[in-house]
Image (cartoon, rainbow, N blue to C red):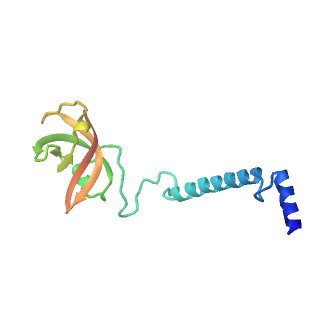
Amino acid sequence: MKKYATLRAAHREAGLSGGHSAVSRCTLFGFCCLLLLFSAAVIYGQGFNGPGAGTNRPGQPAAFFEPIPVSQAKTLPKDSWVVLSGNIIHTLPGGKYYTFRDSSGEITVEIEPKVWRGLSVGVSDRVEIHGKLEIKKGQFSIEVKAIRKI
C-alpha cells in the first residue's frame, strides 16, 4: 500500500494525476472532432451521382429553377421546389390562398402576408412564383416562398 501511495505522489508531482497528459487528451479530442467531421461529409455527400446528376430517383422531391407549367408541377413528388410563371386570378377563403393560372392549367397557391413584401399584383399582372409543392388529400398547392412581377 505504501508503494502505491509513493507512486501516486510521484505521478501527481509530474502532472500525470489522471493517467493521461493534457497533450494526449487534446490529441484525442482533436482526432474525435476530425472523425466526426469526415463521417458527416461522407453521410451527407451520398446523394450525388456524378456530373450533372439532374435526375431524381422516383419519389424524391425535385427542384426546378426555371419556370415550368402548372401541368408539369402536378406530376412531381410532394415537397418539390418549383418556379411557375403566370397570373394570380382569384382570392380564395382564408386570406392567404389564391388561384394561380398559366397556359397549362390552374393551381392553388398559399402566399403568407410577409412573402408579398409590399408587392401589389392585379389579375393582368404576370408573376413568377418560387415555392414548394404540397399535396394534401390529393389536392395540389404551392407554398410560395418568393413572388415577383415579370
Q: Quarter of the image containing the N terminus?
A: bottom right
Q: Residue furthest bottom?
A: 1
Pinpoint residue 19: horizontal percent, then vertical percent.
78, 59
Q: Residue at (75%, 58%) from the top-left corner? A: 18
Pinpoint residue 3: horizontal percent, then vertical percent.
89, 66
Q: Is residue 41 toward the left or the right of residue 7 in the image?
A: left
Total numbered labels: 0
Is residue 8 or residue 141 the one in the foreground?
A: 8
Pinpoint residue 23: horizontal percent, then vertical percent.
76, 50
Pinpoint residue 65: horizontal percent, then vertical percent.
35, 44
Q: Residue at (17%, 40%) from the top-left corner? A: 87
In the image, is residue 114 above or below residue 73? above
Is residue 3 or residue 52 the one in the foreground?
A: 3
Q: Residue at (88%, 66%) from the top-left corner? A: 2
In the image, is residue 138 above or below residue 116? below
Q: Quadrant of residue 8?
A: bottom right
Asked whether residue 104 is in view, the answer is no
Asked whether residue 70 is in view, the answer is yes
Q: Is residue 2 toward the left or the right of residue 128 in the image?
A: right
Is residue 85 or residue 122 the one in the foreground?
A: 122
Q: Residue at (30%, 58%) from the top-left corner? A: 78
Q: Quarter of the image containing the C terminus?
A: top left
